[in-house]
Amino acid sequence: MLKRVISLVVVFTMLFSMTISVSFAKGWDKEKKWKEEKFFKKINAVMLKNKVFDDLEGYPWARKAIEKMAKKGLIKGYGGGIYAPKKPVTNLETIIMCLRIMGWQDQAELVKVLPKKYKGKKVGDWAKGYIKIAYEKGILDDVDMMYFNPQGPAKRHQVAKYVIRALGYEEEALKHMKDELPFVDAPAVPLGSVGYIYLANELGLMKGDPQKRFNPMGTMTRAEMAVLFSRLDDKVDSNVDDKEIIGVVDGIYEGNLVLRTDGELRIFIVDENAIIYDGEERIDFSDIKKGYKVKVELENDKVVYIEVLKNEDFVQKIIIRYTGEVKEISKVEPRRIAVQVKQMLAIFDVLKGAKVKFKGAEGRFEDINIGDTITVIVDKQNRIREIFVHRERVGIEDEVDEIDEHEEEMDEKDEYEIEGILTAIDENSIKVTVSEEVYKFDVDEDVKIKIEDEEADLTDLVEGMEVEVKVEGGKVESIKAEALELEIEGKIIAITEYDSGVKLTIKTDNEEYEYMVSEDVEIEGEEDDIAIDDLEVGQEGEFKIVNNLIVKISIED
């Protein structure tokens, strides 16, 4: 994207110096004005018809939030122009939205297993990573692991809890559990949710209705969800905002938007389907004037959303990012760090447990040096919760640059055990992930392996299994693994026969999966048992997978 923007800036600068310097100062000449008017007629004809969704009539109070969040890729519809604004939001949808806003979606999509403690209701394979990361980030707790109902409608008091936890304000919420809430239905708020609702209201995220009711046990619609998470997005500066640019309009040239940001001129191509808002009103591209302060969203190097900003639109951020050079650092308690951010020297306290990441590796606060360029994530009290160091950790080889320093500490011990997720296997070694830390171990040639208490070989292990690994003298001596079980619902879209067996390709609502079928597979229809040769492309059903083999199929007739 950067190369694209730079090249456009170069072209614009050349054009600017050769042909249009007078135009910006004194107006367009007749030929350019004719081209401009022709362009506006063309683009306005398109933009007047622009719709993100077709079912938002009657929701003027939510339309802007829905369209903005959709253009940012943070909310999705059901296809065919349907958003379903009246539909209640589920617990799972709420969790997913929290992770997206905070910039944790990529982590969730890499994980395919549930937390070991999870005993809640059935979860689709595609969603397991969201629950896993939500648990690791503290959005879900041990109680949620026992009773979580992913498809159940989310109650408003639960939504407040999830949002405040995602922001990292759990401790602050606990301090307000006995505070008085400014709602007439405050007695209906569960005692364990008072502090969360108190903060959600204080931060301007969730408010009562005109009658001062919070309706804690009521459900939240998808329209209300969009408004809530649009407010949250405005208050959180996360990596999902990397494609968000704020600047002052310097001009429009042949359909391109020229913005002055941080003292520099940048030119952006405007997508013909861009959505443009001034306050709560949809406007046309031709309505944008020089001098307007705007916020734009980019997708594939094009502007897809523009919002005209007013002075009163200033929003106090809850979570903020700063990037700069480390000038001073205190590595003893209380830990502090001074960062030169442009012309400002900012001094931050570092929260206990704040995460530190280098390029491609986890790290420690002690690994940061004066002179490093870092990006810090801070809360509204200017306390650092995450640090990203813009260099690789010293002494990390390419092959093992993702392995945490804890591995070296463990290798010095004679004997120890760890529990985690098996994330890589080869003939001589394995990698085990514990939370976000990765450990690599050499495997002893006489290693003892059990899967569900049954003797097994190294080749029987499957990535994604939960394992307990015993290490002696720097090598894995034994591995206890739990069978990796998945259940998916979908349609058979391909059946492939090999000498070694049959492979099915199954399409769900969100993904496609390919699995070999076990020789001992159990296949059921609604009336009779079915042989594997009876399976047909297009049939729908439920598929149980154990260790990457389909062991049971229930076909819907």
Image: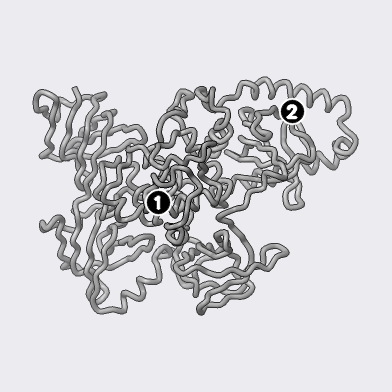
Between marks 2 and 1, how big is the CA–CA gap? 48 Å
Q: Nearer the viewer, residue 279 or 516?
A: 279
In the image, taking residue 119 as reference, residue 178 lies left or right, namely right
- Could you tell me which residue is drawn at 70 percent across and 44 percent down? 312
- Could you tell me which residue is drawn at 66 percent across and 42 percent down? 295
Count of residue discs: 2
Q: Nearer the viewer, residue 493 or 338?
A: 338
The image shows residue 415 at horizontal and vertical percentages of 23, 76
Please tell me the numbered disc located at residue 286: 2
Which quadrant would residue 116 be assigned to in this image? Answer: bottom left
Q: Nearer the viewer, residue 219 or 539?
A: 219
Q: Is residue 35 positioned above or below 312 on the image?
A: above
- Could you tell me which residue is drawn at 54 percent across and 51 percent down? 202
In the image, taking residue 212 as reference, residue 110 lies left or right, namely left
Please tell me the numbered disc located at residue 193: 1
Q: Residues within 10 Å of mark 2 (few under 14, many from 20)?
A: some
- Which residue type carries mark 2? Ser
Mark 2 or 1, nearer chain start = 1
The image shows residue 71 at horizontal and vertical percentages of 55, 36
Which quadrant would residue 501 be assigned to in this image? Answer: top left
- Which residue type carries mark 1? Ser
Q: Is residue 296 positioned above or below 451 on the image?
A: above
Residue 62 visible in this rendered orientation of the protein: yes
Question: Which circle, 2 or 1, is nearer the viewer?
Answer: 1
